[in-house]
């Protein structure tokens, strides 16, 4: 269960981060300026990687582990769907965003920044869906089980007290 909670926490962290990157960081690349853009892009990659890479690697490893060995009480199909969504994120990262960052490291190109922003919506949407899925599972796991209701005992006529019967 601890692994699942840490996995969900990493997904929520990455979801918040990807939304920040999508709405704030990537669009601002247009305003860096062409003169020092390649330095900015190199610094961006150098500084972002140590923050993002360990969390993404943990997400991947724990997501695969959870899909192969789901904790008790967690629907295995949900964890399989989670792993498939992770594959989409990694695929998008390596097929779309990483090559665009490499191209931008050689210099500013407005069309590449626009493509980076537009293709990053894939990761933003998928991380958001994963977080919703994992929160749904967490809520289901942490919801208290319903207390069983006791059936009322049938009305039984009361018997007269037997005090003193054995003493006679």
Image (cartoon, grey):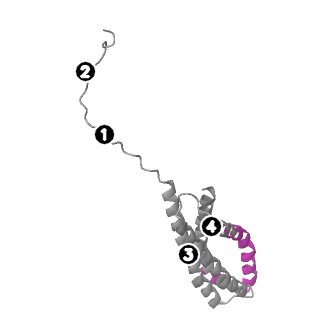
Identify the mark nearer the N-term, 4 or 1.
Answer: 4
Which residue carries the number 3 mark? 126
Q: Quadrant of the N terminus?
A: bottom right
- Nearer to us: label 2 or label 3: 2
Please report the bounds of the magenta region as a residue range: 27-56
Q: Is residue 112 above or below residue 3?
A: below
Residue 68 circle label: 4
Left or right: residue 143 versus residue 35 is left
Instruction: Answer few, some or many: residues within 10 Å of disc 1's Cα (few below 14, many 20 plus, some between 14 and 19).
Output: few
Instruction: Answer few, some or many: residues within 10 Å of disc 3's Cα (few below 14, many 20 plus, some between 14 and 19).
Output: some
Front residue (pair 12, 59): 59
Front residue (pair 60, 64): 64
Instruction: Answer few, some or many: residues within 10 Å of disc 2's Cα (few below 14, many 20 plus, some between 14 and 19).
Output: few
For label 2, the SS is: loop
Which residue carries the number 1 mark? 152
Q: Is residue 146 above or below residue 104?
A: above
Front residue (pair 7, 106): 7
Q: Quadrant of residue 36?
A: bottom right
Disc 2/disc 1 C-alpha distance (Å): 22 Å
Q: Looking at the picture, how far across and down is residue 85, in whole percent?
A: 58, 75
Identify the mark nearer the N-term, 4 or 2.
Answer: 4
Q: Residue at x 72, y 72 (%)?
A: 49
Which residue carries the number 2 mark? 160
Q: Is residue 39 above or below residue 66?
A: below
For label 1, the SS is: loop
Disc 4/disc 3 C-alpha distance (Å): 21 Å
Identify the mark nearer the N-term, 4 or 3.
Answer: 4
């Amino acid at each position: 269960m601890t692994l699942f909670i840490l996995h969900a926490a990493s997904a929520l962290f990455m979801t918040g981060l990807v939304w920040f990157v999508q709405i704030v960081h990537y669009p601002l690349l247009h305003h860096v300026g062409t003169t020092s853009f390649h330095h900015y892009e190199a610094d961006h990659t150098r500084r972002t990687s140590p923050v993002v890479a360990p969390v993404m690697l943990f997400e991947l490893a724990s997501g695969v582990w959870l899909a192969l060995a789901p904790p008790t009480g967690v629907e295995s199909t949900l964890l399989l769907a989670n792993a498939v969504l992770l594959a989409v994120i990694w695929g998008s990262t390596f097929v779309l965003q990483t090559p665009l960052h490499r191209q931008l490291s050689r210099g500013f190109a407005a069309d590449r920044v626009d493509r980076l922003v537009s293709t990053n919506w894939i990761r933003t949407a998928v991380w958001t869906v994963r977080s919703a899925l994992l929160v749904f599972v967490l809520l289901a796991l942490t919801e208290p089980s319903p207390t069983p209701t006791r059936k009322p005992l049938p009305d039984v006529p009361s018997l007269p007290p037997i005090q003193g019967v054995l003493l006679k």
